[in-house]
Amino acid sequence: MEYSIKIPEKYVRLLRKNNEKLKKHFEKITGVKLNIRGNEIMYATDDPVLGFALQRVLRAFGRGFSMDDALNLLDDEYGLEIIDITAFSGRSKNRLRELKGRVIGRDGKAKRTIENLTNTKIAVSGKTVSILGKWEDVYRARHAIEMLLQGAMHKTVYRWLETVG
């Protein structure tokens, strides 16, 4: 079967950069050859389970995770959650920027703290916050981020994570 996925151009450029080193790394680990045309990545595999897993890997890479982190999604224990910030901000660009800032925190402290307390990776890109990790950890990180997006104080969120973690 043939599969394709579109990801942002800046991440496609990373696959082409450094003599396609990252692309070759992906192909070596997965055994699947990538064909890149514009911002669309195409590949073929006879294994539908692998085809679906590679969609998740490439989607995570396109959300801003490193390829090594994204490749964790080949393991069924790992999941990817994408939170649409506009569901909390409406259409205001200023409010969107403010909410992204709450998730990231000063100098990345909030994002780093949530990642450390939940053993996940978090990427803030465009209008979304993406979380990658083991499913149980992703659930806790998602709840913490939603608490921040709904206006909870950072220390309240950290305290909650410490009690449930």
Image: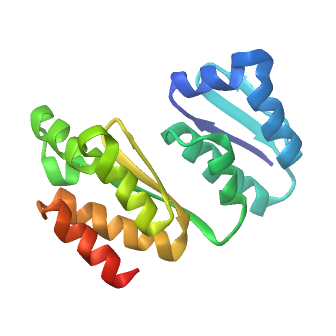
The percent coordinates of residue 94 (x first, y second) are 11, 33
Residue in the image at 22% along x and 47% along y: 86
**Image coords of residue 147 (percent x, y):** 21, 66
Please indicate whether residue 8 sits to the left or right of residue 126 in the image: right
Left or right of residue 54, residue 158 in this image: left
How far from the left and from the top, in percent, is residue 160? 26, 77
Which residue lies at the image location 87% right of the left edge and 54% below the top edge?
46
Position of residue 97 relative to residue 146, above or below, is above
Eyeballing the image, is 107 above or below 17? below
Identify the residue at image location x=30%, y=38%: 107
* Frontmost residue, 42 versus 132: 132
Q: Residue drawn at (41%, 80%), measured in percent from left and top?
A: 165
Q: Nearer the viewer, residue 113 or 81?
A: 113
| x and y percentages locating residue 155 in the rendered image | 18, 65
Q: Count the marks: how many?
A: 0
User: What colour scheme has been applied to the protein in the rendered image?
Assistant: rainbow
